[in-house]
Image (cartoon, helix red, strand yellow):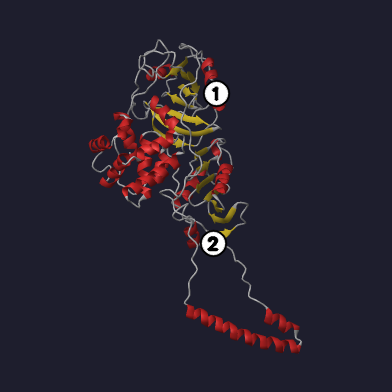
Amino acid sequence: MELHESLYALGRSQGRELFNDADSFRGALDDYLDEDSASTGDINLLVDAVRLGAYQAMISMLDSGADADRAVSEAGGRLARDRGSADVGGAMWALAVLGYATGKVSDVQVRRYRTQHNSAPAPPPGGPATMLPPPGAPGSTPAPGPGPSMGAPPPTSPVWPSSGPTPGVQSGVPGSAPGPTSLGSYGAPPPPASYGGYGHAAPRKKRKVWPFVLIGAVVLALVVGGGIFAIIKATDDSDGDGDNDAKTGSTTNTEDEGPDVSFEALNERYQSLGTMVTSGMDDCVAADPQSGQEEKISCTFPQGTLVLTTYSSDAELRAARQRRLNYAEGTIVSDVQSGAYYRFDPTTADPESTGTPIIYWDSQAGVQSAELAGATGVTADQLDPAFEAVSATVTPPDGPTDLAVDEFMTTFTIINCNRIPTETSGETEESECRRSGRRTWVGKFAKVNDLRQYRNNARTLARQDDDIVVDYWFTDENNNDQQDDDEPEQGKIYGYVEEQDSGSEYGVLYIDDLDCRCYLQMYDKGQGDPLKLYNLIFP
């Protein structure tokens, strides 16, 4: 576990008001962190962020609706000034870490601001779930379960087949009302300046300043040469030789020969995208830039092509990013202002597809983008090594990145998540996780209507199985083990049996949160009994 994750766990265990008092915060860090979890300099930097008011200023901006990147950038600049330090990048990293610890900055953003530091893993956070089933079923605090079972063969990812009727019981009562508003995703107006972890396009070479003596010599040579040229010109005119006149009066062609496409030059110009963007490339040539593009380079390598683009403005880069990113089935998307990542695997929707896999990423600081496209027959998994080879400045998400999804997972004690390509069109993200050793898929939709449609599928399957589980859940905010008038329904719960291609039957428990637009699907170990899964979460 990295330092920002350890601070998140600290805030959950001791209360996030801890971050408002510098002395208490310092004492908690000394007690909570191992000796090698963070350097003394990093701890001092974090404490100074609280002591000097930069953290409070950032929280104030975020609570007023400011973009997280902008709030971190401005508060980080203030912290660096107040400390009399030139390390603005380190100051922004400290503010991002504290923002993550209070649930207002994403993991992806923290990693973008990260500076060199020595952080060792800390114990994982383990807070209680804050939810209850409807009246009549007692509340509980689920605890993390054991690792995945090695018994029955694992189920495939969530699908919606029809399943035969299975006897069961029905529980719960209907109800509907809006719950708490979920936290939004990132992507507001661009923050000023550049961010930690990002380079810049190579600066243009400065013009050389020559000694005045040399300038005088050049002028004298031009004067003498001009006189000689005039005499020759006059002689040629008297001979009436038009050909000689044309040859003597010709000038050297000084037209632009195009951008330097050598690997060394490209690595220098596109360092905002990766340490060595030409790694593994066979050849690179200049391509015709489109409207809003200053430069376009096309490179080839055995698995496909790489296109590097420099844009004329931030707005043009954002427009290009918007055109590329989508939520088609088979995508992994990380969309933050400082740099986006997009991966598309066409075989997710159709295993027999011969479509083109794509990996795209960009840099707001460098105003540049890169796109890898696989050749015919190349899979997305085969394209991944090409991305890894360039040491890209963008880190692909390895788990859930949406803060609302993270809160939803915490409520139901979902752990050990790995990001996967989305299984349903319209999902912004999907991860395969664990809950009490059971495989559990967690996802989020961009639109509430898409989640409603997904919910209807689960409800239909539950009805086909004689309503084994039909219920809803709410947040017991006052912990009185009953639903009050100001504690509306938060989401639906359905259980059904899913038959795999192998013939095995798995019990599936579906739970969603309409405000978050997210859901989970939990599979048993082949017992075909979703009621046991329900009792596991709501004992």
Task: Identify which residue is drawn at 57% across, 38% down.
Answer: 352
Residue 5 is drawn in which quadrant? top left
Q: Name the spot of residue 496 as percent of width and height, x first.
A: 49, 19
Q: Is residue 143 above or below residue 291?
A: above
Question: As drawn, is 100 to the left or to the right of 503?
Answer: left
Dots 2, 1 in contact, CB < 8 A: no
- Decide: few, some or many residues near mark 2? Use Cα within 10 Å; few <14, some 14-19, many ≥20: some
Residue nearest the viewer, comparing 362 with 420: 362
Question: As drawn, is 252 to the left or to the right of 194?
Answer: right
Q: Is residue 52 above or below residue 448?
A: below
Q: Name the spot of residue 502 as percent of width and height, x first.
A: 49, 27
State the residue position of label 2: 261
Q: Is residue 391 above or below residue 509?
A: below
User: What's the amino acid at mark 1?
Assistant: Arg
Whole-Å distance between the Cαs marked 2 and 1?
51 Å
Task: Identify which residue is drawn at 36% across, 23% down.
Answer: 129
Q: Quadrant of the C terminus?
A: top left
- Decide: few, some or many residues near mark 1? Use Cα within 10 Å; few <14, some 14-19, many ≥20: some
Task: Identify which residue is drawn at 52% across, 51% down.
Answer: 367
Q: Quadrant of the N terminus?
A: top left
User: What's the amino acid at mark 2?
Assistant: Val
Task: Say what secondary structure mark 1 lies in.
Answer: helix
Q: Name the spot of residue 92 as percent of width and height, x first.
A: 38, 45
State the residue position of label 1: 452
